[in-house]
Image (tube, rainbow, N blue to C red):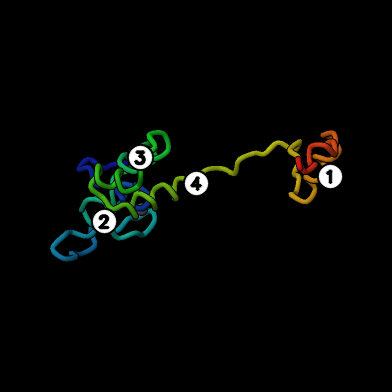
Amino acid sequence: MVSADGLCCKRCGGSDYARSGVVRGHQRYRCRTCGCHFTDTPLRGKPPAMKALAVLLYGMGGMSFSMIGRVLGVSDVAVLKWVRAEAAALPEPKVPVAAVTVEIDEMWHFIKNVWPAPSASVFRDPV
Ligand SMILES: [Zn+2]
């Protein structure tokens, strides 16, 4: 919810606020809904659209973190953190129950039962 002058709470987005002093030359406001103090300054950090573009370029474009950082004018570590944050927000992938796990030491028994035993002539020394 944005008030008539375009100002809203930076935490909850509410437009019910009161003036609450001055901080570093900026008028400070207090949200009546959540009690958050805020000023009429731009939000910190990069816009969500830039973060979404970085995630798309990484996931679908195959670009590296440093290349995305150079294109967008941010550090490669910032791009890494954006991608990790998006990945953490994703739901856990659903694995079908029918998946069979075979350990490496079981593979010998599996192959022995499926494939026929090699004949002795294969391993015979040609001399
Ligand atoms: Zn608020």
Label 2 amino acid? Ala
Between the residue at mark 2 and the residue at mark 4, the CA separation in whole angstroms equals 34 Å
Q: Residue at x 37, y 34 (%)?
A: 61
Front residue of 46/63: it is: 63
Q: Quick one: SS at disc 4?
A: helix
Sequence-first disc among 1 and 3: 3
Q: What is the quadrant of residue 62 in the picture?
A: top left
Label 3 amino acid? Met
Q: Position of residue 101 (x, y in %)?
A: 75, 44
- Is label 3's Cβ within 8 Å of ligand 1? no
Q: Above or below — where is 13 with respect to 24?
A: above
Q: Do the residues labelled 4 and 1 touch (CB within 8 Å)?
A: no
Q: Above or below — where is 78 with respect to 98?
A: below
What is the tally of numbered marks visible in this picture?
A: 4
- Is label 1's Cβ within 8 Å of ligand 1? no
Q: Do the residues labelled 2 and 3 touch (CB within 8 Å)?
A: no
Numbered disc in front, either 4 or 1: 1
Sequence-first disc among 4 and 1: 4
Label 1 amino acid? His
**Residue to which mark 1 is pinned:** 109
Q: Residue at x 82, y 37 (%)?
A: 121
Numbered disc in front, either 3 or 4: 3
**Residue to which mark 3 is pinned:** 63
Sequence-first disc among 1 and 2: 2
Label 4 amino acid? Ala
The furthest residue to the left: 25
Q: Position of residue 54 (x, y in %)?
A: 34, 41
Sequence-first disc among 2 and 3: 2
Front residue of 73/37: it is: 73
Numbered disc in front, either 2 or 3: 3
Q: Quick one: SS at disc 1?
A: helix
**Residue to which mark 4 is pinned:** 89
